[in-house]
Amino acid sequence: MVQELLKGLGITFRRMFNKPVTLKYPDEKMPMFPRFRGRHHLQRYDNGLERCVGCKLCAAACPADAIYIESDENRPGHRVSPGERYASTYEINMLRCIFCGYCEEACPEDAIVLGKDYEFATYNREAMIYTKEQLLDGPEKGFGEPYIRSGAKPPSYA
Amino acid sequence: MTEPKMVTCTIDGRTVTAPEGTLLTDAAKMLGIQIPIFCSHHRLKPLGACRICLIEKEKTGKPVIACAEMVAEGAVFHTQSEMALKARKGIMEYLLVNHPLDCPICDEGGECDLQDTSYEHGIGSSRFVEMKRSFDIVDLGPIVVLDRNRCIVCARCVRYCNDIMGDSALTIEERGFHSQINTRDGGELECQQCGNCIEVCPVGALTSRPYRFKARPWDLKQTETVCNFCSNGCTFHLGRREGTLVRARAKKSHGVNRDFLCARGRYGYEFPTSPERLHFPRIRQGGSLQRAEWSDALGQAVRAIQAARSAGKAVTALASARLSNEDLYLLQRLVREVAASPHLDHRLEQRAPLPGPLLKSLAAFPALPVSAIATLGSALVFGEDVNEEQPLYGTSLLREVHYRRMPVVVAHSRRVRLMQEAASGLPYRPGSELAAARGLLKSLAAHQGAAGPAEEVRKMTAGWSWEALASGSGLTEAQFEKAAATLYSGGSRAIYFGSQALRAAEAPDLVRALIDMALVSGASLVPLWDRSNSQGALDMGVLPDLLPGYEAAPAPGWNTAEILRRSASGEVGVLILAGADPLAHFPDRKLAENALRKADFVLSLDLFETDASEMAHVSLPLRSYAESDGSVTNSERRVQALRSAANPVGESEAGWRIFERLATGLGSAWNYADLLALQEEIRARVPLYKVLGRRMGPAATSWALPGASLPGAQPVGEGKAPAAAAAGTLRVESGNSIFHHGMLSQHNKVQLKLLPGPTLFLAAEDAARLRLAEGDLALLEGPGGKVEARVKIGGPSGPGVGFYPDHFAGAEANRLFGPESPFADIKISTLSAAVHS
Ligand code: SF4
Ligand code: SF4
Ligand code: SF4
Ligand code: FES
């Protein structure tokens, strides 16, 4: 019996000098793989216009029916996106989303992309429906080159 | 008719035999081979503008356009050969030279011919690096948005507007590379706003303003159902997104109309989901209607019917002819069998409703599909502004007049659109329909052989003096002769008549004259009824003197006027208003008001608050056509399926369910598991309707009265000649305008943009005489009272005859016109002149 005890403690003492394999989340975070798909971002052009034109192709591609969009028309003095159409409502239900990335794949404007964030925890279901304001990247994220997953080439908008 | 010669040719190695003159695109379709098309359209003549339909014809060494090439004996065609594919790829590249790549923005995306064809035949990239043409996007009025950037100049819209609608509101400007679509004067579209240009545009150059960016084709729940307005019974697909109906669209493979819709059909989808709909049953308590439970409301109605029966008072019903066949059938059973009363009717507007035997005679004529117009030799349209009231018939006739100069006679009190283009017109004086019909009958009979009905009719008409007919109708013998000759100049003929004839004070005699005309000339006779299911209401026996299936009722009951008169004198115990509002539609408004006040109990079933529903003791919320399953029957007598496209509003119920519950409350053992059970009963009890049921689809066929033979010649009575219009007044008529239908469309915002409120249409010379200008607010004073209306020049008016469309609560035509005649001499004074900016 003593023998078993010593054997076990032996492992314990040996491991005491190894580096830990866990991270002290949330103080420490794991680096994400390049192809990890986290929460969505709606991107903008250099000039601040939204890339999304409200075409609803992402909603059509979504296997989980997680996206809800309403579109409206750009009017003089109220231009939101290039072209005539923009998304007046853009919502993703993160409880439904399976992070498959089909929306990103379907988007002809490179507007919706899946980023790296994965911290969704909240106290109620409503908060899991991300609105356009939450999804849309603001100036602090910097405009410009759209985020494109590795391997793909960004299209040029001359 | 002679059988067309058949021709056999080969397409892609398979032989097809088609009548001579068949276009290759159609012949290929018979084999299931799709040839892409853009500019070709089944209603339009071939043009050959876009060239996407190029296919190879052996032995010619070059591609030919399939949309203009006809089948030829022994010819061999290839649609998939190298030459054909290369030609189409090339054309596709050309078509995309200027076309922008904005499919995600474009409303057409997902149902776009160019998108589909480009996917199939395009090369995926373009060799053109030059700038594309660029134009601003413009609104052409409240309906159509034009984006010339996307236009491929196929000219479908221009030709449809010109050839089919007769409006010529669109044109092509400039030539060659610079060709572009514009309105006639560069401003807004001045037309019937039918939106058919949007429908035929193979790309997204013409899109719909009301539907703009509301949905994409794939997130619409589309349900095929039938338009609820006029009796043409157009099939359309109602598109619902998030519980709201957002568009109606016709599809070219469906329905009697194929891809045609008129403005009210295309934009009439709003009222079913209007917030003004009635949501709950209401019971009168202390002078006002209060929300109640269904059981209480029905209980009150049941007790009222029982009370009426034990007091020996009449139970009566007036129904709307927009209800489904199933609703009407059960209402009729409820009144006849459960309440044991023969008093019911659905004809509110007609001053002299047709007696049962006459309706049966009409039903004995074989049905004529609207598609038959394409092969008719000649036609007579009597007392109906077809283009305004029955647009599918109107445009079908207009097309034949344009394309093959079909001889058409139009008899109407106003110079209506079709009359302006018809070979012969009979513009009789308002109110002299009968004199005009007698004159035409006399001319027609004089031309015909000696035997049969023609002989009888000739004997009858021989004594009629031309002077009396001419002075009575304001027409001359020569005009009648010309009209008769025109009608006889075609082989097969048809006679259409509609609301003006049916609402005339002498309607029965007029219809007898029309039957005689049909018998004498060997024409088909087609009544164009008012409402989407007027035909069904006749078939289902919602009539005082006919049971379902045109059986004579053993003891005829009261018609609408009689019911209201008896009610006003206190003889009616219960008055059921099934979607019907006699205050709005019955010519004598005061009588209708009295009737509702004096009836012991008024039960109203309706979609909206109406003047009548607010006078009722119990008001029940009815489902609209868009929330109901069932069937309606159009003027072709085609029994078509209604399918529910929207969720029921509030606690609303289907009419037939309400009648069933009333009947069970009254002690009957009715128990219909579902609609199919009810339809089965109708099939069993009404042999005409054996077509009704599960498999009833767009290909449903018209019924025919079993064992019916054509009626014999009818004696035609003499009418009174209308007096001349009083000095300083304008003779005005009423009816449906192209933008509205009945009182329902006032709940549609789009239609209110097209015709916002009470309007008086009059001819320019009358406006000048009466010192009125377009846009003036005028006070109209007639025998029935006063209304205020905006003045509009032109429209469906004629010289000396104004037109007052009857669509707006508070300004119904019966507030203006007297009960005697469907026209009146109106005194008009300007209240405030239009502000011209
Ligand atoms: S990632 Fe997949 S499941 Fe999530 S919103 Fe996009 S398409 Fe839908
Ligand atoms: S607007 Fe549409 S229908 Fe008209 S010419 Fe252009 S592409 Fe053809
Ligand atoms: S109102 Fe008549 S013509 Fe117009 S769409 Fe409806 S059924 Fe067709
Ligand atoms: S479809 Fe044949 S030329 Fe346009």
Image (cartoon, helix red, strand yellow):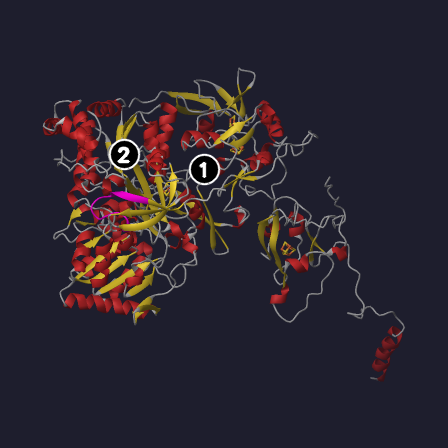
User: Residue B30 lies in magenta, yes or no?
Assistant: no
Residue where numbered disc 2 is placed: B412
Tell me the kind of residue under disc 2: His
Could you tell me how far apart the alpha carbons at marks 1 and 2 are, in whole angstroms? 27 Å
In the rendered structure, find residue B196 and report the number of the disc placed on it.
1
Residue B442 in percent (x, y) is at 16, 27
In this image, B250 relative to A156: left or right? left
Quick one: B276 or B215, which is closer to the camera? B276
Q: Chain of mark 2?
A: B
Circle on res. A43: none
For this view, does B372 lie left or right of residue A117? left
Q: Chain of mark 1?
A: B
In the rendered image, residues at marks 1 and 2 fall on the same chain? yes
Q: Secondary structure at mark 1?
A: helix
Type of amino acid under label 1: Asn
Does the CB distance between marks 1 and 2 fall below 8 Å? no
Q: Position of residue B813 (x, y in %)?
A: 29, 48
Viewer can see residue B332: no
- Classify A133 as above or below B161: below
Question: Label 2: how many residues lie within 10 Å, few (<14), some (14-19) or many (20+)?
Answer: many
The boundaries of the magenta stretch are B815-828
Q: Residue at x 88, y 77 (%)?
A: A13
x, y (%) of residue B379?
28, 29
Q: Residue at x 80, y 61 (%)?
A: A31
Q: Nearer the viewer, residue A77 or B249?
A: A77
